[in-house]
Image: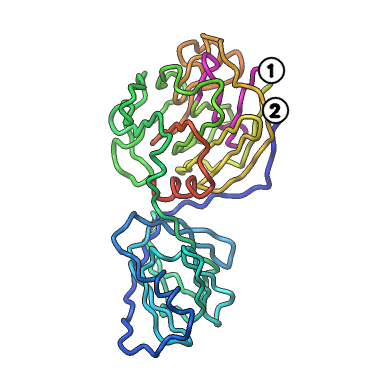
Amino acid sequence: MFTSRLDLIAPVIAFVVLSCSSPKSTDLPARPAGMDLVQGAVQGREGGPPLSVVIDLRDGSRIVGRPLLKRLTLGSSYGAIEFPLEQVASISFPDSTRGVRIEFRNGDVLRGDLRLDSLPVQFAAGRMDLPVSTILRVATVSADDNLVAGLIAHYPLIGNTADATGRGHDATNHGAVPAQDRFGTPGHAYEFDGTEARISLPEGIIDPNAPACTLALWVLARNSPASREALYIGAATAELSIWAQGGEFKFGVGLSDRQWHAVASPAGENTFVHLAAVYVRGKSARLYVNGERKSEVPLPDLPLRSGLTEYTSGIGAYAPEHPEHGKRLGMSNWEGRIGDVRIYNRALSDEEIMSLAHHGG
């Protein structure tokens, strides 16, 4: 096994609500040549897929969540221009006094003064007015229908362990208890006690010769020095694993050469974190935390390890049908909560993983 370590980065998780009143332009001057491209970008339909926002602050903090704001108004040299937020890719604040740079999803760019003084932000613990002068950058992430493509098993874990894709990969619960999810909604996640609780998965979800796959889930890890298994696709058919160990989240891939290849990132404890792991045969294994790529390791061009029938798959446990294997290797059952487990038969892009982490698909 070899592991890539990163400098300590504390994930910040919050769910953001933005609201303000944007004045409408009533008497715009004639636009110069080239402005029709921008106008085409900003007059797109509203009411499309839900957006999330990622806000980077000047003090190094990051806030993520969903805006209620539908439209923005920019004061520019061409006059006041109003446009739907869904057309915006990012808003950059070069400094605290000289306005903003807006990039649209079609590649157009506008500069000017954003007609906002502050953004009201709702954290899990309360509300604050976030002054525009404290913001460095706002990026939007659009919900994407492609997040359904390649989804071969989905366990929302909302009161049951059924596979929501309808493909028949239903799981079996052994002692995990329904619990609140990251939004505080009762019964939308499962609590694992760290000892016996586990959810068994059927085998064959991932093909050992698959060119790529992605695992994604929400986890809340309790404070524990032990190695705790969050999601294990067993070596019975194709070996991949996501676990927490020694203050780190880890993603490991077992290959046919019997070598274990793993990557790691600092773990957040006692708070919900979105984890995604991407395997691409012959290229790399990548670990994402809250939508950001944190660690990556190259892989030889070999199939996934398979054929060890006693190494069964599970949520919250390593080889859950044969717990002696986990104990022998020092692996313990998950202690904390797990929700919304997804398994794809393809490699999700960085943008898709960001979208999945920040609006849930």
The stretch in magenta equals 232-257
Q: CA distance from mark 2 to mark 1?
A: 10 Å
Residue 337 visible in this rendered orientation of the protein: no
Task: Please state which amino acid type lies under the numbered disc 2.
Answer: Pro
Q: Does residue 253 belong to the magenta stretch? A: yes
Q: Secondary structure at mark 1?
A: loop
Residue at 44% over, 59% down: 53
Q: Give above or below for 298 relative to 43.
A: above
Q: Which mark is residue 300?
A: 2
Residue 192 figure quarter:
top left
What residue did someone put label 1 on?
257
**10 Å neighbourhood of mark 1: few (<14), some, or many (≥20)?**
few
Left or right: 278 as drawn, with respect to 27: right
Task: Please state which amino acid type lies under the numbered disc 1.
Answer: Asp
Q: Nearer the viewer, residue 92 or 86?
A: 86
Q: Nearer the viewer, residue 322 or 74?
A: 74
Residue 266 figure quarter:
top right
| Quarter occupied by the C terminus | top left
Identify the residue at the far front of this view. Answer: 33
Q: How is the image coloured?
A: rainbow
Q: Give above or below for 68 relative to 194.
A: below
**Residue 303 in picture, x, y percent from top left:** 61, 21
**Residue 216 in picture, x, y percent from top left:** 47, 36
Task: Count the marks.
Answer: 2
**10 Å neighbourhood of mark 2: few (<14), some, or many (≥20)?**
few
| Quarter occupied by the N terminus | top right
Q: Give above or below for 203 relative to 262.
A: above
Q: Secondary structure at mark 2?
A: loop
Residue at 36% over, 18% down: 174
Q: Check whether the beta carbons of the residues at disc 2 and disc 1 lie within 8 A of each other.
A: yes
**Residue 276 in picture, x, y percent from top left:** 51, 39
Instruction: Work out whether mark 2 precedes mark 1 in sequence or the reverse, and give the earlier one.
Output: 1
